[in-house]
Image (cartoon, grey):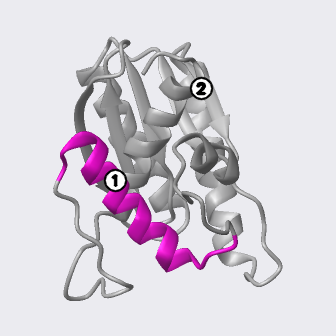
Amino acid sequence: MILSIDLASHKTGYALFTDTGELEEHGLFILEGENAERYKDLFDKLSFYLECNPLVNQIVLEGFTVQSNFGLRSPTILCTLHGVLYGLCWSKGLEIKKYKSKEWRDLVNIYGDGPKNIKRDEIKQRAVALANKQFGTEFQYFKRDTKNNVSDDDIAEAVLLGWAYFLERGEF
């Protein structure tokens, strides 16, 4: 089975696929605490998930790049979370497939025929719409309104990352 993960500093979306590309389940890990507590929380939640799903043999995730308009806090957290994820995968003998954001978005054609330099919120909206169309999900997108609504864009992007994996292999 393939587990695709949209790793983020607070909300990490995941999607579980069969080896033939059928979406089995999807969800969200809410990471609690600050710094080391949050890293341990990801380790514990993902370890438990993998114990409950012993057929997972491949992890698909998006790498990240440090952008000049970000401070150092978010990239530091994401870098450490990636390290936690990699260490866990290696300890369990899981293969890891990493995509650059542009790579998986091109594979699933998230941009359509339009320009590729669109804003983050538009990409998130498109991800939700595309996952809903392709997989029959009912994800919702709420623009940065996390106090009142929980957006499903992290889950939608995890689903699309998994789909990109199968598209690249010609298995979808």
- Going by the numbered disc 1, the residue's amino acid type is Ile
* x 48%, y 78%: residue: 121
Which SS type dominates the magenta stretch?
helix
The residue sitting at the right extreme is 68
Mark 2 sits on what residue? 168
Q: Quadrant for the C terminus, please.
A: top left
Q: Position of residue 64 (x, y in %)?
A: 70, 55
Which quadrant: the N terminus? top left
22 falls in the magenta region:
no
Q: Is residue 2 above or below residue 82?
A: above
Q: Nearer the viewer, mark 2 or mark 1?
A: 2
Q: Is residue 31 visible?
A: no
Please state which of residues 22 and 63 is positioned toward the viewer in this rendering. Answer: 22
Q: Amino acid at mark 2?
A: Glu
The image position of residue 162, as x and y in percent, is 45, 34
In the rendered image, is residue 129 in sight? yes
Residue that label 1 marks: 155
Magenta residues span 117-137
Q: Nearer the viewer, residue 40 or 20?
A: 20
